Image (cartoon, coloured by chain):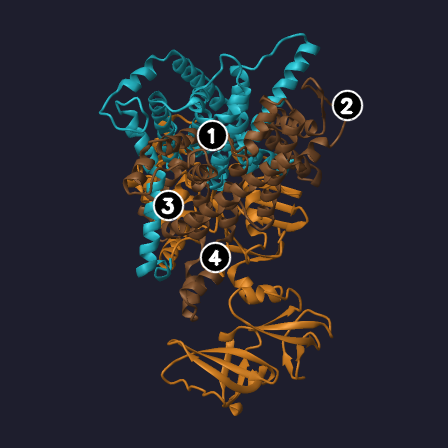
Amino acid sequence: MTAVATPKFEAANERKKSRRGFFLALPAYVYLSLFFALPLLSVVVYSFAKRTSTGGVALEEWNIDSYTKLGEPIVRDILLRSFTLAIITTVICLVLAYPFSYFLATRKASTRNIMLVFVMIPFWSNFLVRNYAWRVLLGNDGPVSRVTEGVGLGETTILFTPTAIVLGLVYGFLPFMILPLYAAVERMDWSLIEASRDLGATGMQTFRKITFPLSLPGVIAGSILVFIPSLGAYVTPQILGGGKKTMLGSYIVTQFLTARNWPVGAAVSTVLMVVMLGATMLYFRKGGRTL
Amino acid sequence: MAGNAKQLKGNTRWALGLNATLVYVFFYAPIALLILFSFSDDPLVGRWGGFTLDWYRAFGENEEVQSALGVSIRVAIMSTVVSVVLGTMAALALERYRFRGNKFFDALLYLPVIIPDVTMAVMMLLFFTIARNAASTIFGVDVSKGVWSVTVSHIAFSISFVSIVVRARIAGMSEKLEEAAQDLYASRWQAFRYVTLPLILPGIIGGGLLALTLSLDDVVITQFVAGPGSTTLPVYVFGLIRRGVSPLINAVSVVMLAASVLLVLLSLVAQRARGGDVT
Amino acid sequence: MGEEMHDQAGGPMTAAVDIQGVTKRFGDVVAVDNVDLEIADGEFFAMLGPSGCGKTTTLRMIAGLEFPTEGSLKIFGEEVGTLPPNLRPVNTVFQNYALFPHMNVLDNVSFGLRMQGKDKRESAHAAQEMLELVQLGGMAKRKPDQLSGGQQQRVALARALVNKPKVLLLDEPLGALDLKLRQDMQNELKSLQRELGVSFVFVTHDQEEALTMSDRIAVMHDGKLLQVGTAEELYDQPVNRFVADFIGQTNLIDATVFDADMIVLANGTKIRAPNPYPAGDKVAMSLRPESISIGHVDEVPEEFRATSLTGTVSDVIYLGHSHVYTVNVDWMPLEVRTNATPTSIKHEPGSEVAIWWDRRSDWVVPDEGHGA
């Protein structure tokens, strides 16, 4: 125990420390490997499987039929619609969240903390219920409709349309945009803005050349956090879109639960995951630290 | 910090303030109206017909709702306990040690947070189906989906959220404190027990409350991995909503929302707290 | 370095800390490079050097917070190289104190005793006594964040000392305090150390702090131990350029050895400077600004002829008690510091002057250890 130190001993000590960390991580490691990584892998494997005539799956016959099927008009439309709605959602969130976060960051600390808590509440609280609230509001003869009729705009009939879906998605995911954006703007060195103004830049120039580039990591993080779940949204299209115009999430579910075409469902899921991983890696590559 | 740049002027201030107000109205008006209508004595949802508690009474008397609530609570508690233990250990390992494969583990731990619900749902469905087939062909036993499969799935995503919250707490705690404890004759375990644990406890509690919230709120994943008799409250409500709106759903929704807001607030309070005393 | 220590009776005495051939590597980086060092019992010992020189790593190895890659580390004769910190009879005052924020002052101070299995009441009593000693008797129930920086510093001190360590380690203990408080604490630490008779080993990057407080000082640079000695030894007889430059202020003049008594400066001037180096060696002469006299060219006293130069004053700064001249000799500027008395003459910039010094006050060091 009290031997003279030697390189061999120190290496052994380092190994001991490393082992300790490894064993601490082990339970979660094993759990996630078994109940997350393995399921994830099976989805990828199944996407290359063949659907049998009975709706079963034959793993022996490898093929990429499920992926070629993504090019068919029906699926292509769904992909296109989902990407379009997800992009629109992300842009609207960005437009609303940017000035909001900027405003938030310029408040004094006590005000800011309270304002932040009121963003955190919708961030974490029940998504299903918050979407349901819009279903009630937008319903036939619902409050929104009555208001628009009252002011002479006529009945509001956006429920079960893509507009309602976007509304629900923005409502659901806006906090996901605000929080990283706020973090980025708040971290910013405000003296740089003063310096820019001091050097004769106008407010707009300062924003374009200083503020916006500095907040870019937040913009990217927020966009990813809104875009990914919007793309895979299932609850919102079901509740507010009435399941009429199918989006990716609903399509995957249909393939698994109703159509019993697991390989295609798995293929679409895999595409969704690849997009997600791509976006995340892009973010970390661009110097972002945490989502 | 630089004060002047933070001073918004005239029109900018007005526009930004207005935008912020509208965002808050957007966040909270629908919820407020939902709460209001849940007390409305009118069978047509979204119309005020005088005050009533009938719908909450119906909530209390509806056996299906009550049994779904029971399942929800059981699953939430079990998954929270397990994910708190595993998530905290993972957080400690990643923040305080370098070990082989820690980068990969870190990535694996992040994935459940960013993966879309639907993807995780089909993953788990596929997995449990394969597992069931394997179990029946190899061991001849039938492992149907049920409360256990819901719990297993919830743990899978909760571990990540717990570990993120706890990691933030550990990262904010100087390693010097643990060294000081050991320098003052504490064994490794004593240093953890008397210094590390009390200081990261708020993070653990915050993470646990978050896991509770996530478990109680999850619809998509649960819907896929629930078997007969393991329908949770959100899944049950989701089923009702798809058939149409009703005042009963309003009441159930408000209860669910209240529970999740309460848990979130508690979690935020816990995460902000200073380390607790452990005597 | 390595010289035998003897107690009053003249017999060999066990060193409080005995470091032999200790090296610490972090991956490819050598933080501490083959260091030999003995610290006597009851000594106030400083480890001095710029940041990243290995002094803190050395301290952490004594504490057991790092283990040496190679070498032997003994505390009172017992090999501790690989013993975990909780089994070593030493305690540490950490940089920024590392007080436990969730415990009150008393619990902080009694922590070490409790961990050693001492009874709760007994520990609390001893802790309270120690708090009285550092004049914080009334603060026992406060939390660390309710104390000022100076008070936190005393708590950290009490928390370590209450365990009666055989050696107290202090990592930049005064770094976080402002100047006035730092000076007070220097005196207090010194008298506390005398009172307790325990070895204090402290790490600092502040040479003035090291000079005023310590019995002996070890100067480290780039992981290597350059010199160990008293303040006077380091100041008057630095072993190389780095030490000469790092301790106090000095003029380092490049030269070549002529013989055992003379060196040749860059412009060919021969200067009397006794040295042990072989003729032709590149050396540097260290000349402290305050040991140089300045006067008119024809004023050089006869006995200082062999240790004088001429130059032009390029700048004068008046500091109240002294004048600081920058004198350009042929090839380099030298700093000269003279007492400013009412009778002293001020040499204006541009004036031709002579500078001279006693030959006992120049010091020749080998031309190594550049890059202070």
Residue nearest the observer in this picture, B245 or C294: B245
> Is any atom of residue C10 visible in this view?
no
- Between disc 1 and disc 3, the foreground one is 1
Sequence-wise, the earlier of marks 4 and 1 is 4
Q: Which residue is mark 2?
A: A60
Sequence-wise, the earlier of marks 1 and 2 is 2
Q: Chain of mark 3?
A: C
> Is any atom of residue C351 visible in this view?
yes
Q: CA distance from mark 4 to mark 2?
A: 53 Å
Q: Which residue is mark 3?
A: C152
What is the three-letter code of the residue carrying label 3? Answer: Gln
Same chain, labels 4 and 1: yes
Q: Colour of chain A?
A: brown
Q: Are marks 1 and 3 in contact (CB under 8 Å)?
A: no
Q: Which residue is mark 4?
A: A212
Same chain, labels 2 and 3: no
Sequence-wise, the earlier of marks 4 and 2 is 2
Q: Position of residue C213 (x, y in %)?
A: 45, 56
Q: Please say if A272 is above or below C246.
A: above
Q: Colour of chain B?
A: cyan
